[in-house]
Amino acid sequence: MREIHHPDVSELDLATVLHTLGDPIRLAVVRLLADERERTCTEVGDGMGVAASTLSYHLRLLREAGVTRTRAAGTERHISLRREDLDSAYPGLLDALVAKRPSARAA
């Protein structure tokens, strides 16, 4: 089986990370993974309302940007957030991204 490539922490690029997280689906994945629980691709996809191929595309982009880590276990892929790596490179970034936004007030 081919090894799954993950960029080294020294290769993380803020512009790439921010560009990758600018998509609502990818940001939703990061928010889902923010609880530090590793999840299978199926668990990530549950309730997302996107096709498996679309989810696979988004998960690949997150991994290639260095935001997530993918671990192969047989035929399953387990996804986790690279919180420690991202926090060391960009302190506070993930906390700001996963924070609940205040509700908009009625005008």
Image (tube, rainbow, N blue to C red):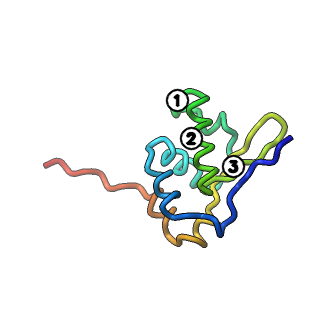
Q: Residue at x 60, y 29 (%)?
A: 53
Q: Are marks 2 and 3 in contact (CB under 8 Å)?
A: no
The percent coordinates of residue 54 (x first, y second) are 56, 32
Q: Residue at x 52, y 34 (%)?
A: 48
The percent coordinates of residue 107 (x first, y second) are 13, 49
Q: Which amino acid does the dot numbered 3 rest on?
A: Glu
Mark 3 lies on a secondary structure that is: loop
Q: Residue at x 65, y 69 (%)?
A: 10
Q: Which amino acid does the dot numbered 2 rest on?
A: His
Q: Residues within 10 Å of mark 3 (few under 14, many from 20)?
A: some
Residue 8 position by quadrant: bottom right
Nearer the observer: mark 1 or 2; the answer is 2
Q: Are marks 1 and 2 in contact (CB under 8 Å)?
A: yes
Q: Residues within 10 Å of mark 2 (few under 14, many from 20)?
A: some
Give whichever of discs 1 and 3 has the lower sequence position: 3
Mark 1 lies on a secondary structure that is: loop
Badge 3 is on which residue? 38
Relative to 89, say whether 55 is above or below.
above
Can you tell which mark lies on residue 58? 2
